[in-house]
Image (cartoon, rainbow, N blue to C red):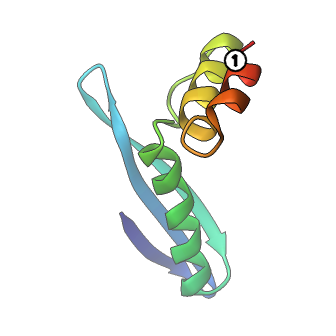
Amino acid sequence: MAIRRRGPDRYQVRVHIGFIDGERQYGTVTVHGTEDEARLADAKPKVKCSRGATMADNPTVAEFLDRWLHDYIGPFKRPKTYQNYEM
């Protein structure tokens, strides 16, 4: 994670999001606002990456739905709800 000031009320947020073909991949966002807002923008890609999503991949609809069901529904819903969603 790196937050760099790029001018008055402008910050660049750079986050390491993983490896593809052995090379480091980064996500970069420019935030117009305060440094606190830049820190919040920094947190969003980290949460996505911790849940298994990366900015660099381009999943099919089926892969996306499988990931959504497993990562976002499974831990938070009852087993019967999970089974109904799975159908």
Point out the image quarter for the N terminus.
bottom left
Of the residues shown, which amino acid type is indicated by label 1? Glu
Q: Is residue 7 above or below residue 58?
A: below
Of helix, strand and loop, which one carries label 1? Answer: helix
**Which residue sits at x=65%, y=41%?**
77
Name the residue that disc number 1 marks.
86
| Closer to the camera in the image, 16 or 12 | 16
**Which residue sits at x=60%, y=15%?**
63
Q: Is residue 77 above or below residue 37?
A: above
Q: Where's residue 70, x and y in %?
A: 55, 29
**Which residue sits at x=61%, y=40%?**
72
- Quadrant in the picture for residue 8: bottom right
Q: Where's residue 41, x and y in %?
A: 58, 67
| Closer to the camera in the image, 28 or 63 | 63
Query: Does 41 sit left or right of 83 as displayed?
Result: left
Q: Residues within 10 Å of mark 1 (few under 14, many from 20)?
A: few
Q: Where's residue 43, x and y in %?
A: 51, 65
| Closer to the camera in the image, 56 or 82 | 82
Point out the image quarter for the C terminus.
top right
Query: Does 23 sit left or right of 16 as displayed?
Result: left
Q: Where's residue 39, x and y in %?
A: 51, 76
How many tags in the picture?
A: 1
In the displayed orientation, state which residue is furthest to the left. 22
Query: Does 77 sit left or right of 50 as displayed?
Result: right
